[in-house]
Image (cartoon, rainbow, N blue to C red):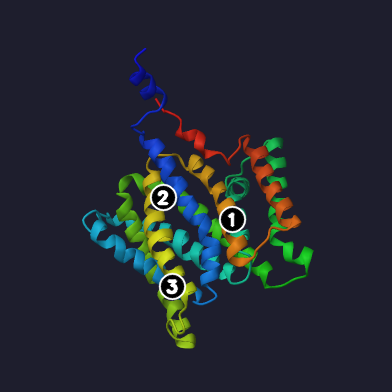
Amino acid sequence: MNKNKLLSKNYPVNLSKKQQAVIALIITNIIWGAAAPIFKWSLQNIHPFTLAFLRFAIASAILFPFAIREVNIERKDIPQIFLLSFFGITVNISFFFLALTRTASINAPIIGSAAPLFIILASVFFLKEKLKMRVLFGACMGFIGIFLIVARPIIESGFDSSVVGNLFLIVATIGSIIHVILTKEIDRKHKPIALAFCSFVIGAFTFLPMLTQEVAVYGFLKNLTMAGIVGIIFGGVFSSALAYFLFYWSMQNISASEAGLFTYLDPIIAVLIAVPLLGEIPTTTYIVGSLLIFGGIYTAEGRVHYHPLHLLKKID
């Protein structure tokens, strides 16, 4: 056999759309995995809704020249795009930032990775689905893990504000789940850059009332340090403009269930950054809770979610 053909067969140069989506989602989740510790560090110097507004205002400005010709929103799509932005940005980011001012950053990706468990719970209460014993056992195991993560402060040292922060992370996760569902419903109708731009503009406007209150009390960017500057730049350029665009583009070429595989990169990246940057060390309770969450998801769904790279294999 011709050597060049053999090499071409085993090591394809031209990646399929799905393989490109896999790479894009890996990049996206590396960025979002780093987000929790970086934003927690930044929020020591800048207030949450000020950072949230600047993050999406800057991202909107970055995407504007590229998106303005692509925006072609029909009137009937406006409510859905508003809801997509409201849950994915306003709800998710508000509670995410508020949580980071109260709890450890490494809790955020672990609780976020438990999204499949919340979907199972919703299917029981809202869709009246009957669970198989395996799924029920896995869900119970996972929720015990979530309880350990949320209640970790009480178990280790007593009740404090970090418990409230952990509960805020659950609300943020619910917002992100709704965001993924709504994105999958409307994503194919619009260009990814247009959808990201519209979401950012709507998100930035929804933060204005809370921004106004913060400015009235604390002033605007007073005594800004490197931590605050890094948070603004990372939030506007990488965690918003780049990551959301890659996410929306990927969702056009991969299923929502497969997209969920990549959230399991987030905890690894978060711990790798949080340990040196914030001195957050995973405790025994944290490790046990994390293992129960991942074990519960594996038991309920019957597959391992922490290895998305197999999707890069050649797709015929």
Q: Secondary structure at mark 2?
A: helix
Residue under the image location 61 percent in, 45 percent down: 120
Q: Residue at x 35, y 56 (%)?
A: 196
- Image location of residue 8, percent across then percent down: 36, 24
Q: Earlier in the sequence, mark 3 or mark 2?
A: 3
Residue type beneath disc 2: Phe
Indicate the secondary structure of the residue bearing disc 1. Answer: helix
> Which of pointers 3 and 2 indicates the residue nearer the eye?
3
Q: Which residue is mark 2?
A: 247
Question: In this orientation, which residue lies closer to the viewer: 231 or 249?
Answer: 231
Residue 174, by quadrant, is: bottom right
Residue with the mark numbered 1: 272
Q: Residues within 10 Å of mark 2 (few under 14, many from 20)?
A: many
Q: Nearer the viewer, residue 254 or 6?
A: 6
Which residue is found at the position 27% from the left and 55% from the top? 73
Asked if marks 3 and 1 touch (Cβ < 8 Å), the reply is no
For the residues marked 1 and 2, what is the alpha-carbon distance in whole angstroms?
23 Å
Give the CA distance from mark 3 to mark 2.
25 Å
* x, y percent for residue 2: 34, 15
Q: What kind of residue is marked 1?
A: Leu
Residue under pointer 3: 229
